[in-house]
Amino acid sequence: MKQILQNLQTGETVAAQVPVPAVPPGYVLICSIFSLISPGTEKMLVDFGKANLLNKARQQPDKVKEVIQKLSTDGLITTLEAVKNKLDQPLTMGYCNVGIVVEVGAEVNEFCVGDRVASNGNHAEFVLVPKNLCAKVPEQVSNEQAVFTVISAIALQGIRLANPGFGEHVVVTGLGLVGLLTVQFLKANGCNVLGMDFDQHKLDLAQRFGAQTVNLSTGEDWLSTCLDFSNGHGVDAVLITASTKSNEPVHNAATMCRKRGRIVLVGVTGLELQRADFYEKELSFQVSCSYGPGRYDPEYEEAGHDYPIAHVRWTEKRNFEAVLNSFAQGSIDTKSLISHQFPIEKAEYAYNLLLEKKANASAMAVLLEYPENSKFTQNHRIEAAALAKRRVVRIGRENPGDQGSSEKAGFFDSKVKAAFIGAGNHATRVLIPAFKTAKAEIKILTCNKGVSGVHAAKKYALPLVATDYNNIEQEKSINTHIICSSHDSHADYACKAIKQGKHVFIEKPLALNHTELDAISTCLEQYSVEKRPILMVGFNRRFSSLVQKARSLIATQKDIKCFNITVNAGKVTKEHWIQDRKKGGGRLIGEACHFVDLLRYLSNSAIKSASVISVVGSGDGIDSDKFIINLGFCNGDIGSIQYFANGHKAFAKERIEIFVNEKILLIDNFKSLKGYGWKNFKYKPLLKQDKGHGECVKQFVNAIENGLPSPISAQEIFEVSKCCIDLSAQLENQH
């Protein structure tokens, strides 16, 4: 299918071919009829993309600070790679869509195949949307009007926060698409409306909708006009729907308000507020959050948990429904706001139009239509077989050798024929290049939504991208599954692969609970030791060149070793998926497992005892990411892992200390190894951070190609995984 993507490095906007998304529980798949380009929001994104690196930095000073901090802790090369990869990620465009439901996921009862719905779907032929971000379109509302639902909800939410009463005097500053919709909703609410803008065309539209206007470009005395408009009292409320870096809109809004007036920021402005503006009049100021309550709440949007109507009358979905109801009643004119309409194939031209000054003056709502979807939208049904075909996209040649001789094309006949499951940041930035460097042949990449997969496939010359796991099973030559999906899916994918006799590399963790762990163990036990496929977990830190050097040094010492690992993990909000024990497993299972494995490797002895203590009642609602793990080993070694999420970013993220026989080794953030008291060793610095990812993958591939044992024994993998699951249970019991 075609989907509009933007390159953040260049600002280039293209209609890319990506596979149709798979449909998880709680989601619906929509075949698009129209989507709407918002000139304000989307032009801002295109402008940012086309800006040079210096101007990008100026627009995001907070990000610059993060880069400087990363430079001090991780070094120049690692930081540059991180920045480059961040800018290299494609951005999906669009948030206003109307179409026909062609597939519903489990746990969706309010929609059926054939329903016509408005949603916040992107510019794509098929969009995957959570059920709480869709609303059914009434029969009397046209597609061209329904596509305005989401952007209208932005205007409506700002009005709800301003809470204007019938007959009140309200100013709307900035008469773009949201501003003109705001004017109409206010008029429908019985308000007197004054619109302000620099563009006469937009002012004319506002007048057509019943508003008085002020042209700010002519030097008209807007304050006198406001006083006349409000009968000398000052206006009751101001809604700022402008987009500017200036602080003036907020200052001017305060000036024109009456005592105890209300100001709501719907757009984007500077926010250097002056106390005097608000103090003397006791003004209220509030920033409106997009479509309404539920926005950016994963429990509402992704998990589908609605807010009780008795406590939250207007959620974002109920705002969508209210907008559609007003459209059905004929109280809102959207037809006058449509300035251009293009087929999806001409989307690049449509975006370029927004950047042209002459054209931009007349550009309001730009509609994209999807002519190839007409046969589906007419009969409201698309066959499952047709969808399945669209869920795989060929990016490159199956055999690079087809381009010429194998030597010229760089083709090699690898014994590792791999399928990648998942295309997240770690998979695309670290693991895919590592497997390519190790000469593994990646035959197919699967991911739920397809966009990140297509980008990675083009970047690393992978042949196939799919959104359906079944496509992997159809690739008969595949002998290895590389699992980088969400943590809660690791065990299931591992069991499926092992049952098929495939080798498995799991990014980590292996499993989230003992049931999953036992299931994987049972799958392995059906094979004899000689024929058992390799199971590998990406515990990469033990493969770091610095860790290897440290282990070789301490191996010469017969005394008991004491280990101390400090992890400056950084704060992750409680809404983040890894904090969800069912999905991410929590940070102990999901992240600290690396360090349990590292101590197991350095000690070279089985874990005898394990305990954990954590902060209780920290005040941020997250108590399970600030903890200390204490390990005892059968050979007498002891180790401590101090995993803290409340440190400062300027401090190194990971620090490993080893005490033995009056000697000390210090690994500083995997950039250097320093020795104290060692005869023949003092210091080993690295030009670039080495956390062992490349060597970890290299040894896994080498084991498959040469029939060697797994680089990490199954016994150690299960031992570490079981230990982490038990420690996580201890944490849970402490809260």
Image: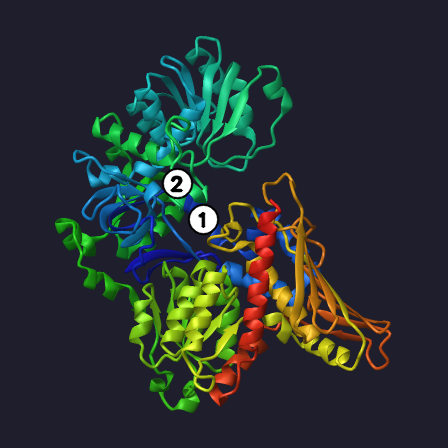
Count neighbours of disc 2 (C-alpha within 10 A) and say few if under 14, some if 14 to 19, many if 20 or more.
Answer: some
Q: Dividing the picture into quarters, in which one does residue 548 lie?
A: bottom right
Residue 554: give its label. Answer: none
Residue 210 against residue 468 in the figure, above or below: above
Q: What residue type is labelled 2?
A: His
**Coordinates of residue 71 in the picture (x, y in percent):** 67, 60
Label 2, on which residue?
305
Q: What element carries label 2?
A: loop
Label 1, on which residue?
45
Q: Can residue 734 be seen in this view?
A: yes
What colouring style does the render use?
Answer: rainbow
**Coordinates of residue 360 in the picture (x, y in percent):** 37, 43
Residue 383 in the figure: left or right of residue 59: left
Q: Can residue 444 be seen in this view?
A: no
Residue 350 against residue 257 in the figure, above or below: below
Quadrant assignment for the N terminus: bottom left
The first of marks 1 and 2 along the sequence is 1
Contact between marks 1 and 2 (CB within 8 A): the answer is no
Depth-wise, is mark 1 or mark 2 nearer the camera? 2
Q: Dividing the picture into quarters, in which one does residue 281 lie?
A: top right
Q: Residue at x 40, y 30 (%)?
A: 157
Q: Which residue is drawn at 46% across and 32% down?
A: 288
